[in-house]
Image (cartoon, coloured by chain):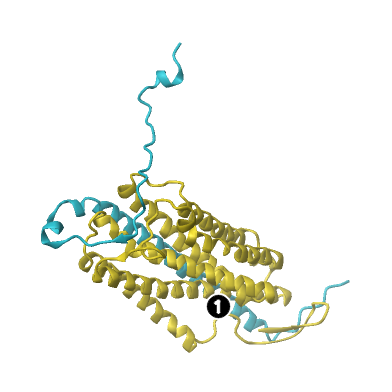
Chain colours: A yellow, B cyan
Amino acid sequence: VTTRRNLDGRVSSRSVSHYGSPPMTTRERLFPGTTSLALGLVLLTLYWSFFRAPFERVMGAAQKIFYFHVPAAMGLYLSAAVCFVGSAAYLYKPSDARDALARAGGDTAVCFGMMVMTTGPIWARPIWGVYWTWEPRLMTLLLQVMIYVAYVMLRGFAGDGDGERKFAAALGVLGAANLPIIHYAVQFWGGNHPRVVSEGGGGLGHPDMKIAFGIGMLAFSVLTASLVWSRFRLHLTASRLARAEEDAVALGLVAEESY
Amino acid sequence: MQTPAEASPEKPVAKPLPTETPRTGFGAVEGQAASQDAGPMANFGFTVAAYAVLWVVLTVFLLSTWRKQLALDKRLGTLEDALAKGAGAPPAPAPKS
């Protein structure tokens, strides 16, 4: 039902249409394919890192965490970039789609942040002897994850009004400022964190290591796209539902307290 | 009189982190003999734990998204039915000012 309103907000006319469940478009049909591709590539990474890539000469089996830890960090960066773009676009010209994109980026950033923040300490324990140390890259990354946890909690619990959306969008924009600091923290301030594939790193010493890492990066890129898309769809559906509920209540079709 | 430190002499002290130069490259073990050594497999439990955590996080995220999407679609369907049935009814009266 499409509702037309007068300037004072009263309902003047309506016509039937769909709010949130239109027929599947070609773009939506891509989603199951992308998700399947992402999971297939993740499994391929698993196979290549465990069965093809050799053990690292100092770290042994623990180094194999690298093939998921770094791609997950890249997923965090990509998701944070999506949140930044969606938030900036929303502040420029508010719309449900832009807000949904920002929220999708924030949610996915928390997911990848959890992966990085758990696999990292598990890797650190046998190599450094401790799960956690207050060194620059770890601290800046922890701060980044906390920013996105705050963003998700704000959007989840503080309501869905225009003010809340704009406040969260500002957080999404400002939160991205920490991303380059994480990346360059090791170079600026040192610390124990390895720098293998970034500037000044010596790289991977075996072709199968490089292939496993390359597949991992590709897998997590596709996975990021897939997860962001799924959350975008979720938040957009929620927005459409909220609009439909408002109209249904305004038309007197449902009681206000029933939704 | 005993000081607190003397009273609990076996209190564990955090080990300082080794201040070695951070790794800048990963090299493979050399030859068959090295891979048969028990060394490389010593930390295999940590690796398995890390991968398990990663899959749990991913699964929880995917399942929660899927369940929320299903719930939203169901509510939308119910609401659309209500809206479609009510589309032919006269508009609701304007609120009295």
Q: Position of residue B19 (x, y in %)?
A: 37, 45
Quick one: A142 or A7, which is closer to the camera? A142
Q: Amino acid at mark 1?
A: Gly
Name above or below for residue A116 compared with residue A10.
above
- Quarter assignment of residue B90: bottom right
The crowd level at tag 1 (other Cα within 10 Å; few <14, some 14-19, many 20+) is some
- Quarter assignment of residue A37: bottom left
Quarter occupied by the C terminus of chain A: bottom right
Q: How many marks?
A: 1
Quick one: A255 or A50, which is closer to the camera? A50
Left or right, A180 with reference to A119: right
Numbered disc 1: what chain?
A: B
| Element under disc 1 | helix
Q: Position of residue B6 (x, y in %)?
A: 40, 18
Quick one: A182 or A89, which is closer to the camera? A182
- Quarter assignment of residue A86: bottom right
Residue at x 45%, y 75% (from the top left corner) = A225
Residue at x 25%, y 61% (from the top left corner) = B27
Residue at x 28%, y 55% (from the top left corner) = A62
**Is residue A163 visible to us here?**
yes
Left or right, A159 with reference to A9: left
Left or right, A13 with reference to A123: right
Q: Position of residue A43 (x, y in %)?
A: 29, 70
In the picture as drawn, the residue positioned furthest to the left comes out as B33
Which residue is the site of mark 1? B77
**Is residue A245 visible to us here?**
no
